[in-house]
Amino acid sequence: MKNIILVLFLIMSNLFVFGQEKNVNNYKFIVVPDQFDFLKQKDEYKTSSLTKFLLKKNGYTVISNSEQYPKELRDNPCSGLNALVVDKSSMFKVKVVIELRDCSNRLLYTSEEGVSRLKEFKKGFQEAIRNAHASMNAVVYEPFLLETIGKDKKEIVIINPVLVEEEKDVKINTGLAEINNLEEAAQVSPNNDIALANNTLYAQPKENGFQLINAKPQVVFVILNTGVKDIYVIKDKNGLLYKKGENWIAEFYDGGEIVVKKYSIKF
């Protein structure tokens, strides 16, 4: 019973963390205010400057709210996130979290608490912000990649949550060569009747898991590690993939109903 509870806890933890990352990783811009609400002066203790510097390491274009915005952000303010440092300090500790909110002020991501015991405010807040940011390693700007396979070429379209940024033509590869994030354009819907000669999928490593492709090739699932052997979270679905005997079972909800499918997977 304890093992079952532990497995469920680990799975729910992964779902929560991934849910946050999924919401923020495809935004291109982050706006940092010149002054956070808990401070009395602009960039007091260099808190805004430090936050801006740290978030740039995550691959975002980071600007302060007093700077001139890039044209793309001016044209579409909702393509950016707002970063806030929130003070949760107690009498003996400086404690902060970094929040990422969308253009509607909806909270999309909260870092772990960064803590410092330093008594000097400047050093204490800077250390706490650095410690909070250290929990954000998985928050990295990743544009959506959509691929449409044509007869003679494969068109790749890079898309932000709202804006189309770039379009390229490349030569199509033969066989089951690595393909990038077909989830949006070529992901197989679990309820459609596209039948393979057999239900064999091929695993290609990705950060934090694998993408599972069929012989077409199309991405059927993207799965995420849970820390428990032979159990994975299915990305973008409320479900799990687990091994049963020699087969792999995918269980997930679709339209409010549970779907169960059996696969052979080549890792």
Image (spheres, rainbow, N blue to C red):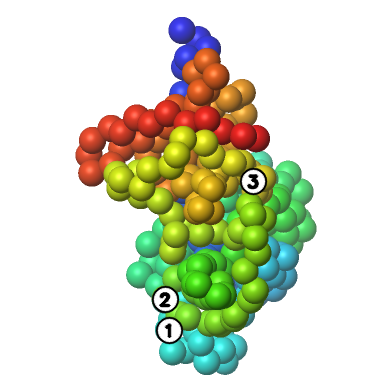
Image mark for residue 162: 2
Position of 117 with respect to 14 (left or right) is right
Within 10 Å of disc 3 (Cα), the crowding (few <14, some 14-19, many 20+) is some
Q: Gap in Å between the C-alphas at discs 1 and 2?
A: 8 Å
Q: Secondary structure at mark 1?
A: loop
- Whether pointer 1 and pointer 3 mark residues with C-beta atoms closer than 8 Å, the reply is no
Q: Gap in Å between the C-alphas at discs 2 and 3?
A: 28 Å
Q: In percent of the image, x 50 and y 68: which residue is there?
A: 149
- What type is the residue that disc 1 sits on? Asn
- Position above or below: 70 against 115: below
Within 10 Å of disc 2 (Cα), the crowding (few <14, some 14-19, many 20+) is few
Q: In percent of the image, x 72 and y 55: which residue is there?
A: 130
- Whether pointer 1 and pointer 2 mark residues with C-beta atoms closer than 8 Å, the reply is yes
Nearest the eye: 41 or 166 = 166
Q: Which residue is mark 3?
A: 204
Front label number (1 vs 2): 2
Q: Position of residue 125 (x, y in %)?
A: 69, 57
Q: Which residue is mark 1?
A: 76
Specify which label sits upstream in the sequence, 2 or 3: 2
**The C terminus - image quarter:** top right
The answer to whether residue 219 of the structure is visible from this angle is yes
Front label number (1 vs 3): 3
Specify which label sits upstream in the sequence, 1 or 3: 1
Farthest residue, direction left: 256
